[in-house]
């Protein structure tokens, strides 16, 4: 079964929203549509250069086509648009099959989706084998970075499309200390001389940041889903819209 063209666009939009919330290098408040050029898309989302980007999507969608085709499409970034990219992927990418599981003589689609998601995650993070429907989405996400988002987006595009994130005070303090210390060290070095003590505040800032990253963020919401049971039902709803 193939992806629809509009699903690929939905995947790209969700990826952009995800990046804009968690990556300070990505411009927020922008919109992606079929008319957006590849160059504009790469700039807005702070993406890899065409060759590396082609390798990423070729592997991500498990394309059974020459890598050079996708490289050519992306390298012609001023002329080609997101529409061209979505059309190419929809023509050549195969959607992963969700094999139905029978429970109590009835087909259970949610169990099938959960098994597929768990299998995909387990290939990348070992502790995914311990996942249960009651497992908390945020807990897994914080340990696995963007792996969860990528796999959900591949199976059921658009399920995760709204995000909220606010770092805790330790992370924010660490970032501020790093920036101010680096600026002060540069100015001090430029007008006087460099001393190793200038690095100390930067090291403290890095330590604060790393400690903060190991703790719960002040706010985190991935589509409003609390546990994997809710997430799977959300994925099921998206998949049902595809089949109708």
Image (cartoon, rainbow, N blue to C red):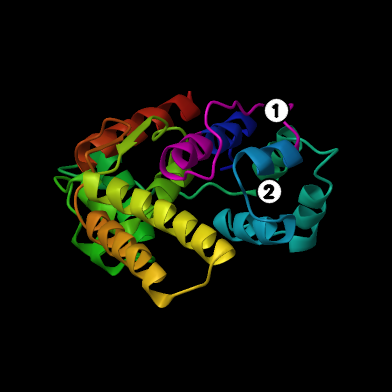
197 in relation to 184, above or below: below
Name the element at disc 2. helix
Which residues fall within the magenta stretch? 14-37
Where does the N terminus fall, quadrant-wise? Answer: top right
User: In terms of image quadrants, where is residue 5?
Assistant: top right
Query: In the image, what residue occupies the spot 45% across and 56% down?
Result: 184
**Location of residue 101 in the rendering, given as x and y in whole percent from the top left corner:** 28, 48
- First in residue order: circle 1 vs circle 2: 1
Mark 1, other Cα within 10 Å: few <14 / some 14–19 / many ≥20: some
**Circles 1 and 2 in contact, beta carbons < 8 Å:** no
Is residue 225 left or right of 183 when viewed as pictured? Answer: left
Label disc, if present, on residue 228 of the rendered structure: none
Q: Nearer the viewer, residue 26 or 137?
A: 26
Q: Say which residue label 2 marks.
A: 92
User: In terms of image quadrants, where is residue 221?
Assistant: top left
Q: Nearer the viewer, residue 105 or 117?
A: 117
**Location of residue 107 in the rendering, given as x and y in whole percent from the top left corner:** 27, 40
């Amino acid at each position: 079964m193939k992806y629809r063209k509009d699903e690929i666009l939905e995947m790209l939009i969700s990826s952009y929203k995800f990046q804009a919330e968690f990556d300070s290098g990505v411009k927020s408040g922008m919109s992606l549509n079929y008319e957006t050029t590849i160059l504009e898309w790469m700039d807005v989302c702070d993406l890899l250069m065409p060759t590396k980007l082609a390798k990423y999507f070729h592997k991500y969608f498990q394309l059974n086509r020459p890598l050079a085709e996708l490289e050519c499409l992306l390298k012609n970034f001023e002329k080609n648009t997101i529409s061209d990219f979505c059309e190419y992927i929809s023509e050549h990418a195969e959607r992963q099959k969700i094999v139905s599981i029978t429970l109590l003589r009835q087909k259970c689609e949610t169990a099938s989706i959960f098994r597929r998601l768990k299998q995909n995650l387990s290939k990348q993070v070992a502790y995914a084998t311990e996942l249960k429907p009651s497992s908390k989405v945020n807990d897994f996400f914080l340990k696995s970075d963007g792996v969860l988002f990528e796999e959900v987006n591949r199976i059921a595009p658009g399920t995760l499309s709204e995000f909220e994130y606010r770092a805790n005070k330790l992370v924010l303090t660490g970032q501020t200390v790093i920036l101010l210390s680096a600026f002060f060290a540069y100015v001090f070095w430029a007008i006087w001389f460099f001393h190793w003590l200038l690095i100390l505040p930067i090291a403290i800032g890095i330590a604060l940041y790393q400690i903060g990253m190991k703790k719960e963020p002040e706010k985190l919401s991935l589509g409003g889903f609390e546990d994997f049971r809710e997430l799977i039902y959300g994925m099921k709803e998206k998949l049902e819209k595809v089949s109708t």
